[in-house]
Structures are given as C-alpha cells and as structure tokens.
C-alpha cells in the first residue's frame, strides 16, 4: 500500500481513483488520508486492484451512475456495501437529439450542454447529494463515490464534500482538474459523436464547476446555505463531518 499517502492510486482497471486526503480544511486541519476516495467506475478492476482495495479496508461504494449505466457494467468488491445514488446521464442523449434534428455538433455546443448539466446537478439533484452526506455521517470505514468517468457527478460531489470540510475553493478546483491529467477514457467512440465533441465530454473545464458554484451562490445564497437548506448539512452536521474526516486538532 502506498506510503506516504498519494493522491492518485495506481489501479489497472480504474484511472481516476484518488484520495481526497491532505487538503487543508476547517481551522487548518487537513482532510484525513485514506478515508474519502473518488473514482471512475469500478467495473474494470483486476483481481490485483480488488486485493489492494481490500487491504485499504474500503467499506462502502456510492454509485452515481444511472440505471442503464449500472446494469451495463456491474462490479462486486469483497466486504464493500454498494449504494445506488442514481443520477441519469443526459448530455450524450441531448447531443444525439441535436443530430437527429439536423443541428451541427460543435465543441462550443457541447461545452454549453455540460455547463447546463452542472447547473442541473445543483438545482435538480440535491436530494442525491443529501443522501451521500447522510451516508458519510454514518460510515465507519473508508468510502468511495463514483460515476462512470468520475469527473462530473463525482466531481461536483467531491467539491461539495471538500467545501463542507472547509477546503478553500481554489484547492477544490485544483482537485477537480486532476481528472484531465489522469483519466483515460475508453477507446471506443460514444454514440458516433465527432472526436472534437468527445474531447469536451471526456475532460473537465474550470467553467463547468464554476457554473455549478455560481448557481449555488446566486440561486441558494452561498455554499453554507445550500449545504444547510438543500442537503441537510447545518452547522452541527458539518461539525460531525469534520470530526469524522478531518485530522484531529493537534492542540
């Protein structure tokens, strides 16, 4: 097992599996290593990968994939309880609908749809993120949350967790962008979409997450109010979260 802790884990069957530990949180206390993990889907893990995660003591997996995604690529991990927090994917279908209606697909249009997706995550899927936080307040061991690529649904979830723990926004964005360095997308084309459009879909852009956080600020009165009113994470719950996932105060 890697020591000292490292952010990106060298798995053969998942390229975006990484640790949220080490970032400075509330009162300067760092996020604990080897407690919170984010990932792309876990359906391609090798036996060696599974053995590594078993040694890690992974206890729960929270899966944001939609029903069809989940049924198409299943997985089992020894000792890990899976929880479906399904958020159905929409962007690829909307792009294909544009093609069917005779409209041109461009990278700019794809980026617009991705930005709309992130706003929708804030306003339409808050119940799923509320469920995630409820689980995090009960989990007794290391957990992983993921979707298919581990970048959008998972990326916004990671941002919410880090912000709830008091991690500064610039570091939250920095963590979000690691996907562009490590994630290796499948070689097969998705739905016959143009390569330049797929290049937008398989990567993240600062503007995507910033659009979500702008919606949090303007539509919901800021992160603390959004966490409290929409996700059930008031001050007491956030303090409990900090006790679980931040290193103890050295004083």
Image: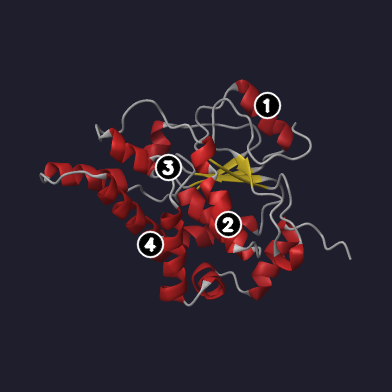
| Quarter of the image where the C terminus is located | bottom right
Image vertical order of residue 121 relative to residue 175, above or below = below
Mark earlier in primary sequence (1, 3)? 1
**Residue 203, numbered label:** 3
| Residue at image coords 28%, 45% | 107
Q: Quadrant of residue 16?
A: top right
Left or right? Give the position of 140 relative to 93: right
Are circles 2 and 3 on residues that touch, CB within 8 Å?
Answer: no
**Residue 136, numbered label:** none
| Residue at image coords 46%, 47% | 64
Q: Quadrant of residue 59?
A: top right
Q: Secondary structure at mark 2?
A: helix
**Residue 54: image x %, image y %?**
69, 32
Mark earlier in primary sequence (2, 3)? 2
Residue under label 4, please give it: 119
The one nearer the camera, 147 or 104, is 104
Residue under label 1, please give it: 51
Are circles 1 and 2 on residues that touch, CB within 8 Å?
Answer: no
The one nearer the camera, 52 or 211, is 211
**Residue 56: image x %, image y %?**
72, 36
**Residue 172, numbered label:** 2
Mark earlier in primary sequence (2, 4)? 4
Image vertical order of residue 136 relative to residue 166, above or below = above
Mark earlier in primary sequence (3, 4)? 4
Mark earlier in primary sequence (4, 1)? 1
Any part of residue 77 in sight: yes
Gap in Å between the C-alphas at discs 4 and 1?
38 Å
Image vertical order of residue 104 relative to residue 236, above or below = above
Left or right? Give the position of 193 relative to 47: left
- Give the label, 1 or 3, closer to the camera: 3
Q: Secondary structure at mark 3?
A: loop
Gap in Å between the C-alphas at discs 3 and 4?
17 Å
């Amino acid at each position: 097992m890697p020591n000292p802790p490292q952010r990106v884990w060298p798995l053969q069957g998942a390229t975006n599996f990484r640790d949220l530990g080490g970032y400075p949180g509330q009162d300067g206390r760092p996020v604990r290593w080897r407690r919170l993990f984010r990932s792309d889907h876990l359906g391609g893990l090798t036996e060696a990968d599974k053995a590594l995660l078993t040694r890690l003591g992974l206890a729960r997996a929270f899966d944001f994939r939609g029903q069809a995604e989940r049924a198409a690529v299943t997985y089992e991990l020894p000792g890990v309880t899976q929880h479906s927090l399904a958020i159905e994917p929409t962007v690829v279908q909307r792009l294909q609908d544009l093609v069917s209606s005779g409209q041109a697909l461009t990278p700019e249009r794809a980026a617009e749809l991705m930005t709309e997706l992130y706003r929708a995550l804030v306003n339409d899927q808050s119940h799923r993120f509320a469920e995630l936080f409820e689980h995090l307040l009960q989990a007794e061991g290391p957990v992983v949350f993921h979707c298919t690529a581990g970048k959008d649904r998972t990326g916004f979830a990671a941002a919410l967790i880090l912000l709830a723990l008091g991690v500064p926004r610039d570091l939250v964005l920095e963590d979000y962008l690691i996907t562009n360095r490590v994630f290796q997308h499948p070689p097969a084309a998705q739905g016959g979409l143009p390569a330049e459009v797929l290049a937008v879909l398989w990567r993240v852009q600062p503007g995507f997450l910033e659009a979500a956080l702008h919606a949090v600020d303007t539509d919901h009165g800021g992160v603390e109010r959004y966490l409290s009113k929409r996700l059930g994470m008031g001050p007491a719950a956030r303090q409990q979260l900090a006790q679980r996932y931040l290193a103890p105060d050295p004083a």
